[in-house]
């Protein structure tokens, strides 16, 4: 399918490039490094080759979220977002931006998102999980009350918030001791991110801000097949859960999922069954994943024409309001 749109595609600044190295063997790293730092050469060639019209690009993980000092987190976000805006300006038909945010300071995060949307034309935010604030062992999750004014701003701006994975802190990872292969993308990213998303749902956040939209990668970080049992057991022992609805209702009404890094047909079918094709969007997770592998999988799936067109581009176009932002999509047919 030509004209595909992808949403979880990363770049790095020289300041953040080292964050990604730990996930790769020494022989794989030089290619990843080169691809994270490139925008207009190899990235564009690959997009052309595999039928990808537009990429929403974001900073690599954990990026801003692991900066302990709030001032430095604010500074890094601004520099990352200004750099990204400059790249988008060079080629807005192919690239749009998702903002990095200094969640260490909720007011500053709201301000930076407002600046990114109003002044830089960004389409939303991508935040890599919890933030450390002040000390390496601190963990701030965004269901906490101090974040609710931030969420009010996100809802007012009417832009999606992509909740991207980061790793559990080493001090909290006893279950993985002696099993380093479980860190990161194979397992701990998903557990961490699904847990964070469940906290948002259970906290009542979406009762207070029903128009909030959260995007999850990796076909929903395991939540679509898990959500029935979660609700089933919470109903038997609610233990004071503030949320007014079943968590599946929030998953269906406040969340979208992307196919980033999860090119598994059975898992996609389950996501379609649980959420509907209108809430699923094609994505890759470049450069950690290959445009070619993702596109060949997607282009050969047995989907109806309508499903393919929605998942491949239509849902993203509508959710991120890409037609008004992106010259090349303006003339494109429905
Ligand atoms: C990601 O950002 O999704 C990611 C990493 C590191 C390794 C794999 C991966 O940050 O998908
Ligand atoms: Zn990613």
Image (spheres, grey):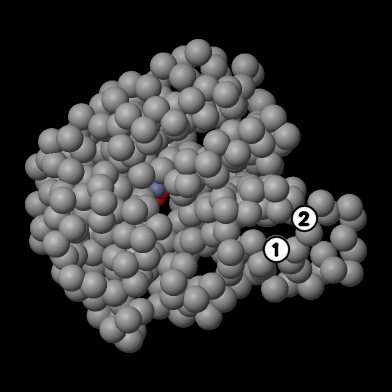
If the image is split into quadrants, where does the N terminus sit? bottom left
Residue 214 left/right relative to 140: left
Residue 260 rendering spot, x and y as whole percentages = 38, 59
In this view, 323 is above or below 129: below
Q: Position of residue 48 (x, y in %)?
A: 11, 58
**Label 2 crowding class (10 Å Cα cut-off): few <14, some 14-19, many 20+?**
some
Quarter of the rendering occupied by the C terminus:
bottom left
Residue 79 vs residue 34, the one in the foreground: 79
At numbered mark 1, what does the secondary structure look like: helix, strand or loop?
A: helix
Element assignment for label 2:
loop
Q: Is mark 1 within 8 Å of ligand 2?
A: no
**Who's the residue at 45% across and 46% down the image?**
159
State the CA–CA distance, disc 2 to disc 1: 8 Å
Asked if the residue under mark 1 is in contact with the one under mark 2, i.e. CB atoms within 8 Å, the reply is yes
Q: Is residue 49 visible?
A: yes
Location of residue 131 in the rendering, given as x and y in whole percent from the top left corner: 58, 31
Compared with residue 46, is residue 170 higher up or lower down, i.e. above or below? above
Look at the picture and state if 329 lies above or below 71: below
Q: Is residue 54 left or right of residue 317?
A: left
- Report the side of 163 relative to 77 (left or right): right
Q: Position of residue 302 (x, y in %)?
A: 32, 86
Could you tell me which residue is drawn at 56 percent across and 50 percent down? Answer: 212
Using the rendered view, name the quadrant where residue 125 is placed: top left
| Disc marking residue 247 | 1
Report which residue position mark 2 lands on. 243
- Few, some or many residues within 10 Å of mark 1 (<14, 14–19, 20+): many
Left or right of residue 259: residue 179 = right
Q: Can you tell me whether the CB of the residue at mark 2 lies under 8 Å from the nearest atom of ligand 2? A: no
- Asked whether 293 or 6 is in front, the reply is 6
Identity of the residue drawn at 73% across and 34% down: 145
Whether residue 184 is visible = no
């Amino acid at each position: 399918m030509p004209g595909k749109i992808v949403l979880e595609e990363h770049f790095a600044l020289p300041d953040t490039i080292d964050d990604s190295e730990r996930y790769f063997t020494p022989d794989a790293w030089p290619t990843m490094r080169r691809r994270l730092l490139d925008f207009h050469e190899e990235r564009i060639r690959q997009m052309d080759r595999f039928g990808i019209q537009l990429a929403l690009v974001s900073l690599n993980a954990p990026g801003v979220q692991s900066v302990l000092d709030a001032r430095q987190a604010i500074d890094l976000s601004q520099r990352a977002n200004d750099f990204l805006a400059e790249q988008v300006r060079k080629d807005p038909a192919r690239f749009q931006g998702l903002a990095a945010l200094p969640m260490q300071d909720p007011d500053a995060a709201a301000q930076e998102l407002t600046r990114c949307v109003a002044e830089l034309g960004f389409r939303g935010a991508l935040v890599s999980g919890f933030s450390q604030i002040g000390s390496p062992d601190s963990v701030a999750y965004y269901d906490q009350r101090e974040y609710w004014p931030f969420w009010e701003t996100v809802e007012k701006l009417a832009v999606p918030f992509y909740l991207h994975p980061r790793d559990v802190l080493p001090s909290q990872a006893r279950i993985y001791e002696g099993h380093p292969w479980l860190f990161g993308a194979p397992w701990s990213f998903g557990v961490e991110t699904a847990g964070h998303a469940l906290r948002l749902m259970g906290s009542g956040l979406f009762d207070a801000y029903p128009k909030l939209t959260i995007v999850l990668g990796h076909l929903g970080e395991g939540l679509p097949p898990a959500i029935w049992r979660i609700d089933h057991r919470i109903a038997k022992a609610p233990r004071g859960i503030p949320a007014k609805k079943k968590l599946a209702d929030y998953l269906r009404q406040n969340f979208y999922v992307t196919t980033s890094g999860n090119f598994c047909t059975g898992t996609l079918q389950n996501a379609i069954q649980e959420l509907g094709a209108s809430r699923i969007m094609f994505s890759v997770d470049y450069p950690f994943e290959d445009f070619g592998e993702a596109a060949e999988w997607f282009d050969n799936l047995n989907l109806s024409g309508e499903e393919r067109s929605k998942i491949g581009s239509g849902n993203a176009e509508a959710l991120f309001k890409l037609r008004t932002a992106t010259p090349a999509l303006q003339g494109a047919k429905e």
